[in-house]
Image (spheres, helix red, strand yellow):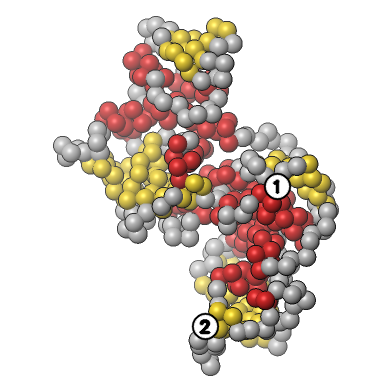
Amino acid sequence: MLLPEPTTLRHVLIDGTIPQVATDEALIKDFGHPYEYAFNRTPQGYQVRWNTPKGVYILDAVVAAHIDPDDQWYWHQQFAFAIPELAEGPHHSSEELLTAARTLNGNGPAYLVPTEDGHTDVIVATPSFPQLPLAHALTLGLGQARNNNLTDDEIRRAIIAFAAQNDYSVAEDGLILCVRSDNGEQAHVDIARLKVRDLQSTTPQLRLTDVLADATFVAAEHQLLLNGRFPDARATTNDDCSVVTLTTPTGQTLRARALLIATLRGETLQWSWADPAVCDLPGAKAALGVKNFAIDNGLGMLLGQVDAATALSQRLYDAAKPVSRFWTDVRVPLSDGSTAIMLIDASELRLPPPSHAAVFATLHETVPHGRDIRRALSYYGAFRRITIDDVDYRRVRVHAPSAPIQVSMDACGRVCSIV
């Protein structure tokens, strides 16, 4: 499938969406997180020295542009595309131009290097980079596409561009694209659902709906326990967002281990591992297992920003609970004005043995639209060691202590009665 030549700067930015986030992730996985950079001038451009806990790594880099003391951008390269922003300059420097420089130079990481004359060199690392598995790269790319607010058509272009840059083949069926690498890897990308299916994987991949269903009633009972033991508690966190302190109006307190899962800013929910403002905090790093789970299972929805109203009404953050085994969530105001969604764990928040009253109350909790109730009940039964069996295709019997509870569902699978 041919990639149309870019005719606008936005096309150039779209074309770098997937390879750039995949390259960044692959470098971190191979080299580790750098704690220091150093730059040395060479006849060909620069050498970039990464100092990481794993060792020292050297990357070659080219000079893509210069920025003068007045923040004006001048390209150091010439391009064949008739795009105004790619003319020599001057242009006002911007993140968009920096991203374009990456796209036009192999999608490696870019750096701004001050020079002795008060200018800044814009350099892009250009060696052969480590590569992620195909499905992982595409999943990260879908998350980045959400962060960049790409439309479905733009995501399609981003996938085709990624394939073209790597000499991969692409077959298309509506909003589902099949990408095949030169070494036989294959992945189906469902743009509408932000889901990647690894056709080579021998391990079944979970859908987002599966994980959310698994969390439904286990999370609900944990929230009931929190509200019962620490009613109207106010939640605060420490500077690194690794501990939450709950304080009730009566003065009762609890310190709990915490994972920073997401932040709310205005109308947007951003997963902590994709939020530059918090991703380096210990509380966010402790939640990276959820990010890795999302990558392994092709769940692009857990890697990019989400409309806050949608995320909250569907309780998308519940997806982190079965993965992390932290079942209780709280919202905590942060110093920058945002709100953190955090998962917490402490011995006081662990469920006691099940009782009929607790199970009955849990089953009466509101379930977000679209949850698979049968799967949710099955997971809850296994978690609480309660037998659950089908009465018929619309009724399920939950063998709670002292007396069974019958859950009935309507034709759409929604709970309509609990007796």
User: What residue sits 53% from the left and 27% below the top?
Assistant: 371
Secondary structure category for the residue under label 1:
helix
Q: Does 61 sit left or right of 384 as displayed? A: right
User: What residue sits 57% from the left and 16% below the top?
Assistant: 411
- Report if residue 58 is visible in the image: no
Which residue occupies the foreground of this view, 86 or 269? Answer: 86
Instruction: List x then y, in percent, for residue 305.
Output: 52, 50
**In the rendered image, which quarter contains the N terminus?**
bottom right
Secondary structure category for the residue under label 2:
loop
- Report if residue 4 is visible in the image: yes
Which residue occupies the foreground of this view, 359 or 50? Answer: 359
Which residue occupies the foreground of this view, 367 or 323? Answer: 367
* Residue highlighted by disc 2: 71
* Residue highlighted by disc 1: 135
Foreground tag (2 vs 1): 2
Instruction: List x then y, in percent, for residue 308.
Output: 45, 45
Q: Does 203 sit left or right of 221 as displayed? A: right
**In the rendered image, which quarter contains the C terminus?**
top left
Q: Amino acid at mark 1?
A: Ala
Going from N to C along the chain, the mark reached first, 2 or 1, is: 2
- Distance, label 2 to label 1, CA atoms, is 39 Å
User: What residue sits 52% from the left and 54% below the top?
Assistant: 274
Instruction: List x then y, in percent, for residue 294.
Output: 58, 44
Circle number at residue 243: none
Q: Does 128 sit left or right of 373 as displayed? A: right
**Quadrant of the image occupied by residue 154:** bottom right
Instruction: List x then y, in percent, for residue 165.
Output: 77, 62
Q: Amino acid at mark 2?
A: Asp
